[in-house]
Image: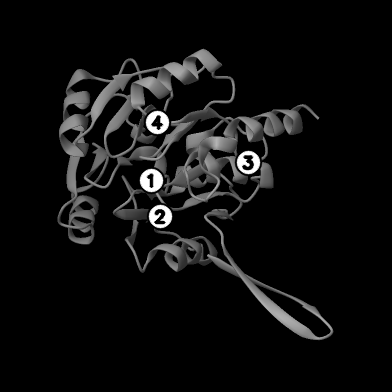
Amino acid sequence: AVVSTQSGHYGRGIQILFEVMALRTQFQNSSEIGVFAKLTNSYCLVPVAECEAFYSVFEGELSDVIKVIHTTIGGCRIIGRLSVGNKKGLLLPNSTTDKELQHLRNSLPDSVKISRVEERLSALGNVIACNDYVALVHPELDRETEEVLADTLGVEVFRQTLAGQVLVGSYCSITNQGGMVHPKTSIEDQDELSSLLQLPIVAGTVNRGSDLVGAGMVVNDWIAFTGLATTATEISLVESIFKLSDKGPSNVNQMRSVLVESMVS
């Protein structure tokens, strides 16, 4: 999104353009954007429902670059929690109907591989977090699901917990540029995860202190969408760790300190 502002002296206006890389929106009255949408580097999934404001934000920013597809999964709108995907593939739960599967096959780019998997932990978006190369999964994910995941998304799979939480998809968000994890993840665990994934990792929040990082936003390598409740400080951290702005990860520790102070105060 390009935002325009004008300032002037003695009636002479100067127009300043700057690009906003993290946008705030909500689905109906919910700021849990990651529950209702799935964003990758090659497609975006949004639910079929009457929420024009929600769709227009995604389509306005993405439609020139990647396809925004309206769908349901198993008749449900919580597609961000039920599916997991990257630019190479999309993994769906067994509850996905044949009609929904065919619609997605017809709508997604030909290069995207689609698989439907029988998994006890059927809310795949809650138990798996991934980028285009690696995936973090719930420690008890079925071995067969792990194999299908690795094959469909072309990723290396690691079983992981975050600050004692097994729902890694809910408490973590990773791209090819960086990752944000549960705010109570220790520095040692962040460093270990950073070494494992070969990515900069930071603990943070969205939606004014929510630890549901994965459920509270969607992000790819060039843009992020967070809940409407997300603060300016949280937005800055998101833009920095995911390298969505010129700040890069160098200011992350400083912003992390500001974030902690703002949460405490």
Residue type beneath disc 3: Glu
Residues at marks 2 and 3, CA–CA distance in whole angstroms: 26 Å
Question: Which type of secondary structure does the marked residue at label 3 adopt?
Answer: helix
Q: Amino acid type of disc 4? A: Leu
Mark 1 and mark 3: Cα distance apart in space: 24 Å
Is residue 228 placed above or below 180 in the rendered structure? Answer: below
Classify 33 as above or below 186. Answer: below
Can you identify the residue that label 3 sits on? Answer: 234
Residue 140, quarter of picture: top left
Element class at badge 2: strand
Quarter of the figure that contains the C terminus? top right
Dots 4, 3 in contact, CB < 8 A: no
Calculate the distance from the C-alpha at mark 4 to the C-alpha at mark 1. 27 Å
Name the residue at the bottom extreme: 11
Residue 186, quarter of picture: top right
Tell me the mark number nearer the camera, choosing from 4 and 1.
4
Dot 1 and dot 2 residues touching (CB under 8 Å)? yes
Position of residue 82 measured from the top left corner of the image (x, y, whole percent): 36, 39
Q: In the depicted view, which residue is nearer to us: 189 or 137?
A: 189
Q: Nearer the viewer, mark 4 or mark 3?
A: 4
